[in-house]
Amino acid sequence: MKWKLALLTVRAQKASFLASAAVMAAGTALLTAFATLLETGLRTGREPGFLVMLPAILGGWTVAIVAFGVVSTVSLTIQHRERELALLRSIAATPWQVRWAVVRETAMVALPAIAVGLLPGVGLGAVVLGRLVDGGLVGATTELTVGPLSFVAGAGTSLCAAIGAALISSRRAASIPPVRALADATVPAGRPLARARAVAGAGLLVVGLSLAAATLFMDDGPLLSSTAGPAGVAVAVGLALLSPAAVTPLRVFAEARIGPTARLAARNIHVRAKHSAAVASPLILLVGIAAGTLYMQSTEDSTHHGPAAAGDVAVRLAPVNYLVVVMIIGFSAIVVVNTLVAATRRRSREFGLLRLSAATRGQVLKMVAAEAAVVAGTAVVLGTVAAAATTVPYSLVKTGSPLAAGPVWMYLAIAGGAFALVMLAAIPTAAGALRTRPVDALSAP
């Protein structure tokens, strides 16, 4: 009976749950790819060291990135359902009944989504192994090994992240007293940064900066990226967790003479700080990881000149690194788009109220565009700080300069791509929501 109710809930909220499912499937594919390489390295008799070291280092970053992406997407889906969960409390459901209902619904979505991501993950692993073989980094006869470890690592990480997010995010709605449940559920989510989130974010910043400092004392060699890369990832995740505090100062623009649309956008971002941070978080990771890893590789490339470099391991590894970066950027882009589309779609009641308050469609779209631009700009700034945690120490060791080698257009492309991604996801979704009659939008869930 409980699982039937969960199925009915999933069907009723299928648009929101599909966003989470897409992220879980993509994350599982990425994790499974590295797990297949690791299993191949552990089981092969030839050159197992490199095939173990590479997925262990890159896979470690990926676990953190995927786990954060899954947690943030699932958490946002549950936050959007706080009114519904509060209603369950008001009809005598206990806190644990509410929380386990959310866990069942999340598991029902996660299991098929994870299953869908396994086979593409094996395919991605085969592609990366092919690049390694082409570069002469592993034996030409090495074949991909797919066993229990590959599936357990990929599926297990995604499932644990999803269930963990369900338990954590359902806690607020489950803890609301039944008498105040419906009233509290309608309060905007612009609350101060939660203590646990602040502590976790600060802790990751300390870890990231410590890894960046450790990079300065390492020898120039293939293992230099083993601390520089994770430093940027840790700082990016830490800043993503602390991002609600980053948008709080924007309240000063709510009363500034910058036009009514811009003032309303600033006020919305401040009041909805938690939701704004949910959109900014995956974008911070995208910018930080893309800029950090691409400029780290371009700095490495700048230190190699002439034909003698052809036999260098770092040179032969470059195509593999670029492929992995593209895979991680692709996953981050999926998280950004799904998060932003889900967040914008859930604002149909707000848009309807604005329309009934005499706002035109054009004014609402301008407000959404202004919010998206501010969130994207904040994410680009924080992502650049995270990238610096990777590129500055790496470049100091490699070239003696704190500035990474590489073209300026690469950074402009990353920043411009972040803005374009946000705009292309937010504005068409808002335009679609505005097609609903304002009166009908007010009755939307």
Image (cartoon, rainbow, N blue to C red):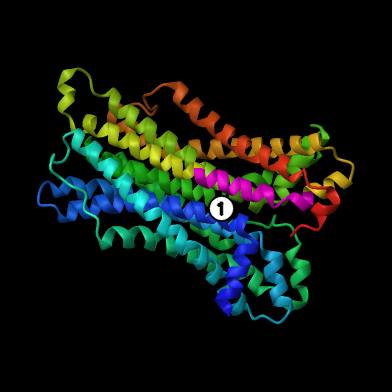
Does the magenta stretch mainly form a helix, a strand or a loop?
Answer: helix
Residue labelled with disc 1 = 19
The one nearer the camera, 148 or 176, is 148
Quadrant in the picture for residue 174: bottom right
Q: Is residue 75 left or right of residue 330?
A: right
Q: Circle 1 sits in a helix, a strand or a loop, which is it?
A: helix
Quick one: which residue is furthest to the left in this view? 45
Amino acid at the residue labelled 1 = Ala
The one nearer the camera, 345 or 376, is 345
Rendered residue at 81%/37% (across/down): 361
Quadrant in the picture for residue 186: bottom right
Q: Which residues are magenta?
A: 334-350
Question: Can residue 85 be seen here?
Answer: yes
Where is residue 42? Give x, y as percent.
18, 55
Rendered residue at 54%/36% (across/down): 380
Q: Is residue 206 above or below residue 162?
A: above
Count of residue discs: 1
Rendered residue at 50%/41% (across/down): 333
The one nearer the camera, 193 or 119, is 119
Q: Is residue 145 above or below residue 397?
A: below
Q: Is residue 271 above or below residue 7?
A: above
Question: Can residue 202 be seen here?
Answer: no
Where is residue 425? Give x, y as percent.
61, 40
Q: Is residue 346 magenta?
A: yes
Quick one: which residue is furthest to the top in this view? 306
Q: Residues within 10 Å of mark 1 (few under 14, many from 20)?
A: many
Q: Is residue 164 left or right of residue 316?
A: right
Q: Is residue 267 left or right of residue 54?
A: right
